[in-house]
Image: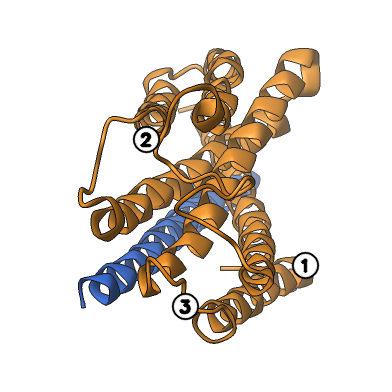
Chain colours: A orange, B blue
């Protein structure tokens, strides 16, 4: 997908692939088998890493929205929409892998507890962001509306993060441990490598996705030139 | 056994969604590049025609 001669793009793709392979090796070989949950706990490494990338991607959309409204121009809008699309994919991964972890541990795939409910709402909020972008045709209006929406929608990130601290939640807290999750040093190393690998993957995907937006702009420019030609 | 099944499905979901995202980006990139080269060719032909007149 990286264009010929795009060494930075190629480097990002190869290094994120290598980092994910390293993370997978650590998850299945280096990290110990959790005593209570067994092998299903190994879902946790990619679950937390995809949640981190989802939150970070929405934060980038939030910042790019501010950048656009502050007069930063079209490139900020490109970054905002690209990052929201990647974030949505990773939050979908988080919700699905979380449900697959919950079934053997909690006995159900889904329960309407605060963290899960906010995650479901967050998913819908960013699906609506995509729908908003598709429904407004005029580019500047679309960018302005999407920037405001992206800033407001970001409230779901701190809400989701603090849900397990503000309300009584059965979702494990990886920072404080809790009854269901006690992390050994090897687990912590594996989690850190997974977080780094997913961050690299996010950067590689964002770069390619922004290039796609630029191609779209180039096409729109060529079409406008074509339409202006005398018939 | 249930544990392993859920573990395998979870990692399959990760690879599946990553593949869908990358494949959709690749398909959109190809479609845009094709459309750009089609319009560029058309514009070149029109310019050549206008110069010839």
Say which element carries label 2: helix
**C-alpha gap between disc 1 and disc 3:** 37 Å
Which chain is mark 1 on?
A
- Residue identified by numbered label 2: A116
**C-alpha gap between disc 2 and disc 1:** 37 Å
Q: Are marks 2 and 1 in contact (CB under 8 Å)?
A: no
- Residue identified by numbered label 3: A33
Q: Residue at x 47, y 78 (%)?
A: A33
- Residue identified by numbered label 1: A8
Mark 3 or mark 1, which is nearer the start of the sequence?
Answer: 1
Counting from the top left corner in percent of width and height, residue A144 is at 60, 14
Quarter of the rendering occupied by the N terminus of chain A: bottom right
Counting from the top left corner in percent of width and height, residue B12 is at 33, 70
Mark 3 or mark 2, which is nearer the start of the sequence?
Answer: 3
Looking at the image, which is closer to me, A13 or A163?
A163
Q: Residue at x 54, y 87 (%)?
A: A29
Mark 1 or mark 2, which is nearer the start of the sequence?
Answer: 1
């Amino acid at each position: 997908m990286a264009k010929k001669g795009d060494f930075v793009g190629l480097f990002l793709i190869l290094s994120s692939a290598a980092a994910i392979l390293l993370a997978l090796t650590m998850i299945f070989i280096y990290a110990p088998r959790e005593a209570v949950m067994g092998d299903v706990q190994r879902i946790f490494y990619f679950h937390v890493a995809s949640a981190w990338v989802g939150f970070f991607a929405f934060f980038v959309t939030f910042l790019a929205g501010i950048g656009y409204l502050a007069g930063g121009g079209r490139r900020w809008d490109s970054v905002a929409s690209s990052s929201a699309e990647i974030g949505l994919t990773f939050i979908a991964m988080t919700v699905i892998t979380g449900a697959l972890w919950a079934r053997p541990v909690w006995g159900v795939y889904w329960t309407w507890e605060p963290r899960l409910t906010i995650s479901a709402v967050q998913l819908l909020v960013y699906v609506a962001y995509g729908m908003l972008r598709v429904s407004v045709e005029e580019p500047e209006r679309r960018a302005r509306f999407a920037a405001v929406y992206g800033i407001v929608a970001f409230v779901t990130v701190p809400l989701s993060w603090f849900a397990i601290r503000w309300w009584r939640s059965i979702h494990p807290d990886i920072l404080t441990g809790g009854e269901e999750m006690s992390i050994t040093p090897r687990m912590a190393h594996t989690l850190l490598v997974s977080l780094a690998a997913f961050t690299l993957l996010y950067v590689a995907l964002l770069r390619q996705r922004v290039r796609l937006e630029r191609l779209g702009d180039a096409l729109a420019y060529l079409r406008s030139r074509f339409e202006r030609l005398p018939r | 056994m249930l544990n392993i099944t859920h573990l395998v499905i979870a990692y399959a979901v990760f690879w599946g969604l990553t593949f869908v995202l990358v494949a959709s980006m690749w398909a959109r990139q190809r479609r845009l590049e094709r459309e750009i080269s089609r319009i560029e060719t058309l514009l070149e032909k029109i310019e050549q025609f206008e110069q010839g007149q």
